Amino acid sequence: MSILIKNAKLNEIEQDIFIQGKYIKKIAPNIDWEADTIIDGTGMAALPSLMNGHSHAAMNLLRGYADDMALMDWLQNKIWPLEAKLTENDVYWGSKLAFLEMIKSGTTFFNDMYWHFHGTARAAEEMGLRGVVAAALIDNFQKKDMQAAKILVQKLLEESGKYSSRIQYAVAPHAIYTVSKDTLIWLRDFAKEHNLLIHTHLSETQNEVEQSLQKFGKRPVEYLHDLGLLGPNLVVAHAIWLDERELELLAENNVKIVHTPASNMKLCSGIMPLPKILEMNILTCLGTDGTSSNNNLDIIEEMKIASLLHKVNSRDPQQANAQQVFQLATLNAAKIFAIPAGEIAVGKLADLILVNLDAVSLVPGFNLISDIVYSANGSCVDTTICDGKVLMQNRHVEGEEEIIANARKVANDLVKR
Amino acid sequence: MSILIKNAKLNEIEQDIFIQGKYIKKIAPNIDWEADTIIDGTGMAALPSLMNGHSHAAMNLLRGYADDMALMDWLQNKIWPLEAKLTENDVYWGSKLAFLEMIKSGTTFFNDMYWHFHGTARAAEEMGLRGVVAAALIDNFQKKDMQAAKILVQKLLEESGKYSSRIQYAVAPHAIYTVSKDTLIWLRDFAKEHNLLIHTHLSETQNEVEQSLQKFGKRPVEYLHDLGLLGPNLVVAHAIWLDERELELLAENNVKIVHTPASNMKLCSGIMPLPKILEMNILTCLGTDGTSSNNNLDIIEEMKIASLLHKVNSRDPQQANAQQVFQLATLNAAKIFAIPAGEIAVGKLADLILVNLDAVSLVPGFNLISDIVYSANGSCVDTTICDGKVLMQNRHVEGEEEIIANARKVANDLVKR
């Protein structure tokens, strides 16, 4: 399988891009090689596709179901009761809807944490996306649930082998306030043994820190450090309430951070110290969180929100500039998840998008990255390619009508159940 | 001229909307009146169109030209030098581009402040939008410029009569740091005599307040109060740095405020105290500011940014809820500018949009207003109607390709001039 993209704007000039299998094989003006598929990129710019470092894809089913509430009230009284009723089929259609939304806004990679692993993995496999699908874990400090969690994690590791190389397996203890010390330690060793990422929520609210101090006598990062969890395979979402010592621990142990500004603002969780974290060279990317706290999966919008938030919060308009936040959403995520993508270059994976330069928000077009970050939204993406396959062209994704109809039906059934 | 919209979702049920001339004549299921134009609203929701309370339309030419800079550095070294070179033809094409962008994101009203009045007024007239086009004024405290300003304001008042009733004339002293006391007083009387709105920038930066204290011995609002400028016809943009006494003065004098969160965040101007202002019942709407400090004109995006900013800033997730910010962008603006619109009701102006409920960000669709505010962006708008005329249908605006090509050319010529 090969694709030849003709005359797309790349690094300020019109070039052709030749994709062979999953990889970018050649970039040059006027490539005359034969290809199975030819895409006319005239009037479009080629950019690396976006990467979403923290999602709960199936929560697309719950979008708009409950808003304008505080995190714990929202979780305990609205989200968790509905989630308890979810079936694998629900998760499958919720995930299909999420992945459709990602493709339509130029995202081809996600790092997901949710229940009913196979619902999400199967949806991603079918939709052609690349992602880390984790077995989410909550044991609520109950012995019975600890045992069940371990069995599930082992079972899913084996079963995850049936998916393509695009789907990576990980473990995801929900948070230190929902997962016991014993389970965390067991997961640490299990992840090490099988070379897996550990994906967790960390220090999302001030209350979480207070509870940690009360319960464990230490702050969340110190607690995880003492349990031996901090390491290069740990990916933490949110990371808002951190003191100096905790930041140092994260940096020293090469822990990765996913910044989710829209969700943090909407739930009033707080503001992650992004400028400080970047200054300390802690590898950080962007994530949307689930759509019931965002409420979309548009990483192009997330870049703008990230930049604006940190500018006004730091009182420094040079903070979180367009180039920096674009890198968070592309190259940084590629580094964090060890994927040879996040830039358009020979030898890299063909995970890329074509954006329509005649989209009104990209005109007149003085600075493409600034226009993408500050002016555009996901609808400027015309073509989305992942793993050398065209997932969207001319804004159409195969089967999108069916996905929308089924997801809507499943969501409406769920709230009546 | 009449339009019949069939089967659009309005207030949770499918209804028909009959438009006669500029006005909404009837709303009911199954209207069987004959109409010149019939629009199939199946799968779409009808909403009032959005209103933009503070724009510099022609600045669309400068989008992406200079970003990540502080307000004064940005104005003095990047924006003002280019603006000095602008011709009326440039302003015309920049405004056409802006109005195209507004139509494509569901906005049909704007309140604009810029140079070369006729460039903007003519563009709005042609594009079919409703707007307040103001004669912007800067005299830099120079006698010569004061005289010229007065002559211009009088001349434009007469000339503005040639436009349709959609185009309203106003005066716009740029700010208290660029316009003299004499000119402000003269404008106050001129506006009163001719029943005009006064549109100005107010207390955008902390530095502006400091300068006011140094130069006038009082804070900006007190200064305007002492000059007799505060009144129901005064519309102030930004209104960030206000003390208690100033807020009271604005409330007592029924001054109107336009909140521009994206621009204020991007330029690090500060955070307007929206919750306090709403609590004091000061009439407030939303604005985008110009695209070189936003960098788009999408009021749907602006609603989300407003809500998220005030939630995280107040630490209260119930602040700036979806319904409230939607009202800022519709009914509040209609009240401020005395336009019988901002809601879909019999007897109101036919300024409305149809949004595509199959847009992926509006699925599953539990709460339309929440979905519009938190999840959607301007691209969910399928049809835009203003003053009883269809400006966009199926996302196509007549002549959009020509506008984009000409605006791009004019912008590129401008920076080389």
Image (cartoon, coloured by chain):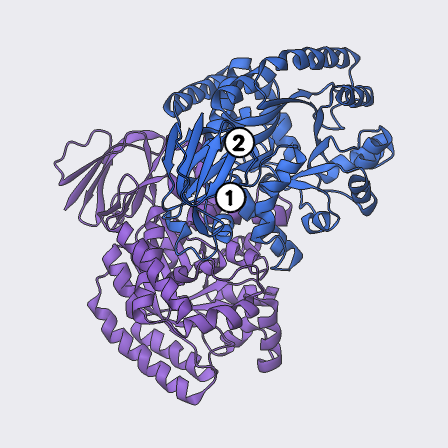
Chain colours: A blue, B purple
The chain containing the residue under callout 1 comes to A
- Residue A3 in the image: state x and y as whole percent: 43, 31
User: The disc labelled 1 sits on which kind of residue?
Assistant: Glu
**Residue nearest the viewer, comparing A4 with B9:** A4
Nearer to us of marks 2 and 1 is 2
Classify 10 Å Cα crowding around label 2: few (below 14), some (14-19), many (20 and above).
many
Q: Is residue B174 left or right of residue B68?
A: left
- Residue A309 in the image: state x and y as whole percent: 60, 50
Who's the residue at 23% across and 58% down the image? B126
Identify residue for label 1. A301
Residue A50 makes an appearance in the image: yes
Identify residue for label 2. A23
Q: Residue furthest bottom?
A: B143
Who's the residue at 36% across and 44% down the image? A42
Respond whether the residues carrying marks 2 and 1 are from the same subunit: yes
User: The disc labelled 2 sits on which kind of residue?
Assistant: Tyr
- Residue A383 in the image: state x and y as whole percent: 42, 36
